Image (cartoon, grey):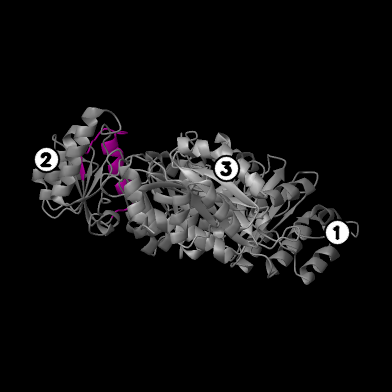
Amino acid sequence: MKSVKTMIAEALAAGQNTLSEYDSKRILTEYGIPATREFLTEDFADVEQAADRIGYPVALKACAAAAQHKTEMGLIELGVKDAVELKRAYDRLAPKARDLGGGILVQEMIAGSRELVMGLIRDPQFGPCVMFGLGGIFTEALGDVSFRVAPLNDQDARSMPSEIQGSKILGNMRAMAPVQTDHLSRCLRQLGQIGLDHPAISEIDVNPLIVRNGLPVAVDALVVLQTPEPQAAEEAAVSGNLDILFEPQSVAVIGASGTPHKAGNDVIKNILANDFGGKLYLVNPKGGEILGHQVYPSIQDLPDGIDLAIIILPASATPQAIRDCAAKGAKAIVMAASGFAEVDEQGQKLQQETIQAIRETGVRAIGPNTSGHTSTPHNFTSSFFPLGKIPRGKVSYIAQTGNFATHTMRYIMTGEHFGVARVLGMGNKLDVEESEVLEYYGRDPETEAIFIYLESFKRPRRFLEVARQVTRSKPVILLKGGSTAQGSRAAVAHTAALASDDRIIDGALRQAGVVRVHDYSHLILAAKGISAMPLPRGNRVSFSAPSGAMLVCMTDLCHRRWGLQVPKFEEKTRRYLQDISPPYIRIRNPVDIWPAATATGVEYAYREGTEAVLKDDNIDAVVMILMITEETGVPSMDFIVELAQRYPEKPLYVTFSGQKKHEVKLWGVDVCPEVLGPMALTPVSRMA
């Protein structure tokens, strides 16, 4: 047998962009992926001999590189039972096979009622990616698939089948043996390995992959080829850590302004408001003094030994300013200007000049087109949006948008009342990019959870590698902007037609342990919850509500959207809740609390019921939905704070329904239902 590399090279030399089914399966079997028993024949005598060796019934197929969709082209005869049918099928298919420049494939018939699909596609961002899903003639119509980036480990491969909506067909069904997950996961891993080993393979389509006696068997396969382009090495990361960005000892503002509300003025006010303890130098050609600080006429006039320079100058002046600041010892640069590659061709040239200046000087730089960064443990920010004192917290942000360091940060401070550890707006990412910042946050003792907004990955595979390490110890939550599918690709194989940027990104992030969110507000609300509460030990939740409809909707959301479990209570918990409730209500998880509230009082029912659930070892997090009206009572909220303090290891979330005018005071902050709206969860801080 020819080697896989030789087979591919010969096909490309012959001008083929696909391999025949027979050759495609030879590659699969070379990698240990089971395929049908079959023989490629040239005349009827060979066909008869092959059918006798396999045993009737058999399948006949016209086999050629150009026979890409054999069913649609009428190139298949299935279930051939005897020699008479064999001759009839051969006579029909042989002329078509000759016209295509191929032969007749005689193949065993596979008995199995479950059809799956697996495939490989070479994504421009992530490289070879493996697909798995429901197969057969409805593959593209159903689109029930999951993706992972190669290489796959055993956990990656095992998790893919569980993610498809039709995953139940892989288990025991109508006396059919369950799919052997060891064998299936090995097939998926090996498919990814083929993509890594052979850059000339752009796509692989295995459809159907039929389950026979619990084992997957490739019944049909198609390999799509490409002329591999020279492998461009991924741009190496600049050496050196980011400590100088987040913990500078001396800072220069290039483009300082004495005019209120100009960027060069607001950045100074922010630095002063945050009690920066290092040295602050200002540069403006006019000289003089701004906000009590001496102003130097030029960068050349600055003293030596500056750590970080914030350049608030026009784009055209930025490259030379970088060189001048580096000459004064600056090791890090924040470039605020816009007008680079995001604008026009001239901006693109200017961006290249800026990159050259960064490389020549060896500085670490964020931006351009950034709104700055924040490091509350160091009492520092380079943001030029009016923020004032930024509260310190335990969550950190990476943002490919200017608004997180500006108006979103202002909203968090004034509307959501939690603090941050680090915030970095990356801008055009000429130097510092997301994977490096993620790695820094991963080892940062001040950061307990990481939130990311990205529109593009600069070094996609490096990002996944870093994320996979960081998520072992810290939660990483990401919103991907610009992720909607651009429509099906014009492709030969099902795999490419089913792939989209969003599906591949979804699989890649799951693989790396990153939690993906789809709403911008969740980057704030989830951070608020993590800031105030401990992380739950598991995914088992309980909630109490004054309405059965709320309980039904919350349960649906838990199972369908969030992957959370709503388990049974321990028997002692269930009995206690039943004891404080009227006999007509049957208590279970989730808890319809209102019958108990009408019998014993709102505050008593919620306090006793919630504490019983917090004690339950089957529950990891508790949600309390309060109804507050003048007629039903406005209870004191002190008991909620007391419960949060008494059970600090379990998160307790509270939301409100009822009369909007009532304000509830929690941890010294007014939380108004009118602002939150129904079902908006409010974390109860352990420090209340």
Of mark 2 and mark 1, the one earlier in the sequence is: 2
Residue 132 in view, yes or no? no
425 above or below 340?
Answer: below
Question: How far apart are the alpha carbons under marks 2 and 1?
Answer: 77 Å
**Which amino acid does the dot numbered 3 rest on?**
Tyr
Counting the numbered discs, the total is 3
Q: Mark 1 points at which residue?
A: 586
Does the magenta-highlighted stretch encompass residue 262? yes
- Alpha-carbon neighbours of circle 2 within 10 Å: few (<14), some, or many (≥20)? some
Secondary structure at badge 1 equals: loop
Of mark 1 and mark 3, the one earlier in the sequence is: 3
Chain part drawn in magenta: 253-276
Nearest-to-viewer mark from 1 and 3: 3
Quadrant in the picture for the C terminus: bottom right
Between 48 and 486, the one lying in front of the other is: 48
628 above or below 442?
Answer: above
Question: How far apart are the alpha carbons under marks 1 and 3?
Answer: 69 Å
Q: Name the residue under label 3.
A: 90
